[in-house]
Image (cartoon, grey):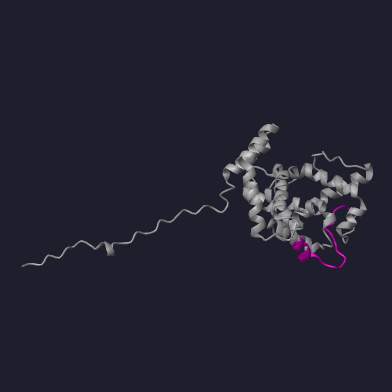
Amino acid sequence: MTLVISQKRSPLVSKAKKPIKKKKKPKNYYFNQTTENAIIRYNNTDDVNLKNKIYNEHISYAFDKLAENIIHTFKFYYFDVPSEQVKHEVVSFLVMNMHKFKEGKGKAFSYFSIVAKNYLILHNNKNYKNYKIHDKMEVLDYGSNIKEKQNISDVADFNKEYVNEMLEYWDNNLTNIFRRQKDILVADAVLEMFRRRDNIENFNKKALYILIREMTGSKTQHITRIVNLMKKYNANLTKEFQETGQLDTANTGSFL
């Protein structure tokens, strides 16, 4: 009698199926090309109702998640108010700066990530302590008749009205003078120091450069180039203010 051995495999030794790998979502899946396109459309229309519709449908959630992620990623927990309120403040700051984003000058996600981080760095109590020093400090010397070694509060005391008008001029002309997105980010970070001058204690030039590098990711050489160009403009603004007592903040013509 011949013994026939079956060639079929036992179910117990059947080849195991490989687990199906789930496709990972990109980290910024909530802020994608659709979001960027919506921001461009938002900036290109003057219709308030359309702006609200675009923002609510395509931008609001992305800004909310962006702010939330940056707060937790970089551990911006040292605020005197609840984190949810901090998030709302960051989102408001992003909305205020939407008009500065220019199509074709870089990705919207990167730009607004830096803008959000800028706000948080300048308002985070721990960062103030990290950068605080106790000697008499010097500031980025804006204005031809402002001494190189003065702190920010001295600039404000020198002429608060001038500083406010200077900031208004730059707000109106920033994207006319600087075309590249990375230049705009550095220039706006410098201006943000002046906007928040009452909240910044005793920053010297080195500390300010460190802070601007942290805010923008730019190298010192790049920051210096932007600051030097801004100083040339500001020398003319100072002269105009001294001669007329005011600045033509809507002027878009080049001084240089």
Most foreground residue, 16 or 244: 16
The residue at the point 94 percent across, 43 percent down is 243
Q: Is residue 138 above or below residue 91?
A: below
Which of the image's four quarters has the N terminus? bottom left
Q: Which residues are magenta?
A: 125-145
Most foreground residue, 249 or 224: 249
Residue 208 in percent (x, y) is at: 78, 60
Within the image, what quadrant is residue 168 found in? Answer: top right
Residue 32 in percent (x, y) is at: 57, 46
Most foreground residue, 241 or 43: 43
129 displayed left or right of 49: right
Residue 190: within the magenta?
Answer: no
Within the image, what quadrant is residue 71 found in? Answer: bottom right
Q: Main secondary structure of the magenta part?
A: loop
Which of the image's four quarters has the C terminus? top right
The residue at the point 64 percent across, 43 percent down is 60
12 displayed left or right of 172: left
Residue 49 visible at all: yes
